[in-house]
Amino acid sequence: MRRILLGIVVLLVLAAVGFFALAWRSEIEPVTAGTAAEFDPELVARGAALAAVGNCIACHTVPGSKAFSGGLALPTPFGTIYSTNITPHPETGIGQWSEEAFQRAMREGVDREGNHLYPAFPYDHYTLVTEEDNRALYAYLMTREPVDAAVPDNDLPFPINYRPILAGWKLLFFDEGEFEPDPDQSEAWNRGAYLAEGLGHCGSCHTPRNRFGALESGGHWSGGEAEGWAAFAIDETSPAPIPWDGDSLSFYLANGWHPHHGVSRGPMAEVTENLGTLPQADIDAIAAYVASVMGEPDAERQSRAQQILQEVESGPEMQAVNAASQTEAGSSDEIGAAIYQSACAVCHEGVRDLPFGGLHLSMSTAVNAPNPQNLINLTLYGLPAADGVRSAMMPGFGAVLSEEELLALFTYIRDRFSDQPEWNDLAERIRATRSGEYHVRVLPSDGIERGPSNIGASNDDGDT
Ligand code: HEC
Ligand code: HEC
Ligand code: HEC
């Protein structure tokens, strides 16, 4: 008996030693912050473009404060993680980081002192970035204005607050290593794949996650979520009524809208705002790669799309006749139809072209998707105006429609503008969204949040 016990103790000690050996990373010596002049301006410019693809500024800046100074709260199912200050400030930023330390953070998710980083920092994608591109990113960050700003401590429960356990997470879920081009594909395709899978980290929102917050293997781009929004499938299961192709994707990613797909919203608005600054060749490469992941739509989808486009072009008179003949007097469908006609049709079947007019809802992914979340978010909170520029706008109806009315409205919209089955989680999602459970982040269509105010949160008050 004692021998067995001893054996177990020895095994446990060995396991612990093994774990620490695995978890341990050395500190990389601090350096004195390099002066801006030491970096080649061309390298810095390249880094700026790469930082836009990586959307670094969105996570590393609290709206209204200095760029890259960190402190943005990222709610996760496990607790709140705060982004760090990545300006070259020597104490509160990464001013003491050598290029080697930065390269390691991007590739392995380890900070300069050797601590494992949480994958809220999407190094599970950034690991694909080449050494050369990381050098440019480093040059760009090191030439930003240093900002003295300490960030709050993470608010995570034990044992998740204990960083060495991240070594176990990495062992299970993290594949380290640079992007390897596929020799059977064109150069542009490989460029697109490199940008989308690596710095663009499309999968961090568009791929579903498991209980451990890791990307589901086998679920690549099949639809995930981000900041209270559904990030629709962008693989062959894309629910878009009018199938995407290379041209429409390229236009949408560069401009943040498309006449057959509407305006990009929520966290995607930030993505398109940033991608819009890229050279056209890079946008086209990403679009071509995404289109190849989606594949060619089958004949049935194509003919349905043709039918939708014809109906939309047939004009509002025809549609109104059709709609009227479909609803029964006094039914909940009639209530939904009445709300739609008075509150929505004026813009969504109106005469203004996109992006300032609304999309005909039979072309809307939000209405045709398996998940009603984005339709709910849009109707409750609308699309706020972007400062100083002409932008797509929609009022929020959170304060004027009751839960029953919203339910009737969405049931009617789904029935009339899609051939998909009813949503069975609709009532529950309306309730949970209104009570603020999903922390919906509402952004204007240019993706730039001007202040710390969250329209979503303020509208949640008093609804329940
Ligand atoms: C989705 C949000 C998100 C994006 C996008 C993002 N980061 Fe971060 N980043 C974080 C979070 C959160 C942390 C802190 C992780 C932790 O505390 O373990 C972090 C940490 C870091 C660190 C470690 C700094 C330190 O002091 O430990 C570096 C370096 C970094 N990010 C650079 C970048 C760069 C460069 C980009 C763009 C290419 C980027 N990040 C994009 C969320 C993000
Ligand atoms: C921070 C999270 C996030 C990232 C990163 C992200 N997306 Fe999205 N994306 C979303 C969300 C949320 C939506 C749905 C928004 C909406 O309803 O407009 C969306 C919508 C889209 C759509 C429209 C789908 C449709 O049928 O309407 C496309 C296409 C798309 N994303 C492509 C990409 C590509 C390509 C990348 C990488 C370069 C990317 N996204 C990165 C969150 C993200
Ligand atoms: C004052 C004009 C206006 C009104 C009223 C309005 N919308 Fe919108 N809506 C817009 C604009 C502009 C957009 C952005 C363009 C787009 O994507 O359709 C938009 C976007 C949408 C989208 C996203 C479509 C997509 O997939 O791109 C949905 C869904 C939507 N609105 C639903 C509604 C509903 C439901 C109502 C009525 C309760 C309504 N809207 C009332 C102007 C309006």
Image (cartoon, grey):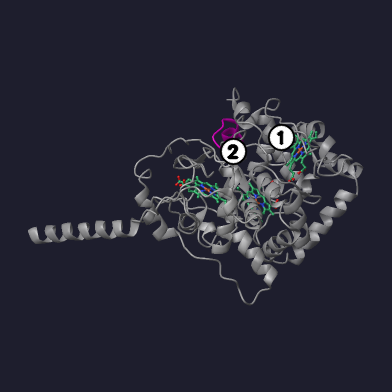
**Circle 2 — which element?**
helix
At x 37% / y 43%, what residue is drawn? 161
- Distance between the alpha carbons at the discs numbered 2 and 1: 17 Å
389 on left or right of 87: right
What are the residue bounds of the magenta stretch?
A: 429-438
- Is 422 placed above or below 153 here? below
For the residue carrying disc 2, how many other residues have a C-alpha within 10 Å: few (<14), some (14-19), or many (20+)? some
User: How many marks overall?
Assistant: 2
Q: In the rendered structure, which amino acid carries the disc numbered 2?
A: Arg
The one nearer the camera, 148 or 189, is 148
- Label 1 CB sits under 8 Å from any ligand 3 atom: yes
Residue 15: horizontal and vertical position, in percent? Answer: 25, 59
168 on left or right of 375: left
Quarter in which the C terminus is drawn: top right
Is residue 243 shown to the viewer in this render? Answer: no
First along the sequence among labels 2 and 1: 1
For the residue carrying disc 1, how many other residues have a C-alpha within 10 Å: few (<14), some (14-19), or many (20+)? many
Disc marking residue 382: 1
75 on left or right of 297: left
- Is 91 placed above or below 102 here? above
At x 55% / y 41%, what residue is drawn? 146
452 on left or right of 111: right
Residue 306: quadrant of the picture:
bottom right
Of all residues, the one furthest to the left in this rendering is 2
Of all residues, the one furthest to the top in this rendering is 462
Identify the residue position indicated by label 2 in the image. 429
Q: In the rendered structure, which amino acid carries the disc numbered 1?
A: Gly
User: Is 432 one of the magenta-colored residues?
Assistant: yes
Residue 374: quadrant of the picture:
top right
Quarter in which the N terminus is drawn: bottom left
The one nearer the camera, 345 or 291, is 291
